Amino acid sequence: MSEIKALGYLGFFVSDVDAWCKYAQDILGVSVLKDENSNNLLLRFDAYAWRIKLIESDHDDLAFVGWEVSDEEELDQLKQRLSDQGIEYQEGSKELVEQRQVCELITFKDPDGTVCEAFYGALQVTNKPFVSPRGYKFVTGEQGLGHVVLLSRDHEKQQHFYKNVLGFKVSDYINTEVVPGKPLSICFMRCNARHHSLALAPVKIPAKVAHIMLQVDSIDDVGRAMTAAEKEGVHFSFTLGRHSNDEMLSFYTMTPSGFDVEFGWGGLEVDDDTWHVKVHHVNSSWGHKFQRPPRPSK
Ligand code: FE2
């Protein structure tokens, strides 16, 4: 089984920090910390010092994906496996370790060039409890931050890397047209009880991320978040619906960076002893109607 225990954190380059600050607080209901020495933002969801880092930039892109392992021994095992498979990794510098607020980390790239980090010992800030500006409680803990859907260029190599090198388990596949007229097979992978912490979708566009998912512990909070998003005029990329595979009841809004955040409740927890790989031909049992994004006004 994988040394990787959870999706720990994510980093994004963002071109509009102010829009993100508003979106994070008013739509996602997470708390926002401003970096003392830059215009970067740290988003908090729980006891972790941060879960998402937004780095001010002239463009919008995924910066890094942080995978959490248990301890030093597990990180050593992962290093060994990467070496055995001929995959280069770098030890995180003292400066990077301080920035990430962890005990130790390594960095490496997946076959598509996504910057991955593996770490242990994330700082917990229990003396300043996380308080959602909208009163939400996020489902994190052993299930990690949520999930991330990467758009894979080399789909076969990506699946092999995450399955055979990093040790993720395949939960299922959805073979469907998420966007009308564009059939594809999405591979859903897990590293803990969350049905998937990672999904790989073979879509060759410049963006690296389709969406990330944040889960709250109350169905009413999904409704409240939806009402807030409607009031703020945020673009809904997919309307409210229930996914066929992880049974998440969710809706999707577009972030100021162009990728989506799925905001959901009720995601399936998988028991490794009884789960078997499945295939679905629909993305959702109901709802999740795709809405084309508005053309940017110039
Ligand atoms: Fe999702």
Image (cartoon, rainbow, N blue to C red):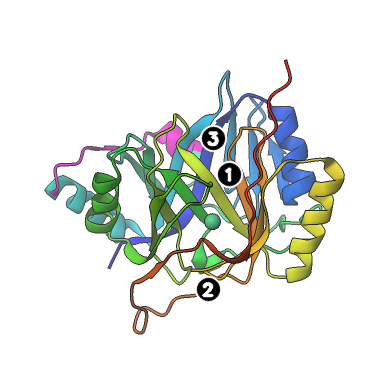
Which-is-in-front pick, marks 2 and 3? 2
At which x and y percent is residue 257? 61, 32
Type of the residue with mark 3: Phe
Name the outermost residue toward the right: 231
* Secondary structure under the numbered disc 1 in the rendered image: strand
Q: Nearer the viewer, residue 151 or 139?
A: 151
The residues colored magenta run: 85-99
Mark 3 vs ligand 1: CB under 8 Å? no
Q: How many numbered dots are placed on residues in this image? A: 3
Label 1 to label 3: alpha-carbon separation: 8 Å
Is residue 113 part of the magenta span, yes or no? no
* Residue 46 visible at all: no
Name the residue: 63% across, 57% down.
Answer: 288
Name the residue: 79% across, 68% down.
Answer: 220
Type of the residue with mark 2: Leu
Residue assigned mark 1: 52
**Left-right relation of 268 to 279:** right
Residue assigned mark 3: 12
* Secondary structure under the numbered disc 3 in the rendered image: strand
Pick whichever of labels 1 and 3 is earlier in the sequence: 3
Pick whichever of labels 2 and 3 is earlier in the sequence: 3
* Secondary structure under the numbered disc 2 in the rendered image: loop
**Are the two marked residues, 2 and 3, in contact with CB atoms closer than 8 angstroms?**
no
The image shows residue 57, relative to residue 249, as above or below, that is above
Identify the image quadrant of the C terminus. top right
**Left-right relation of 75 to 55:** left
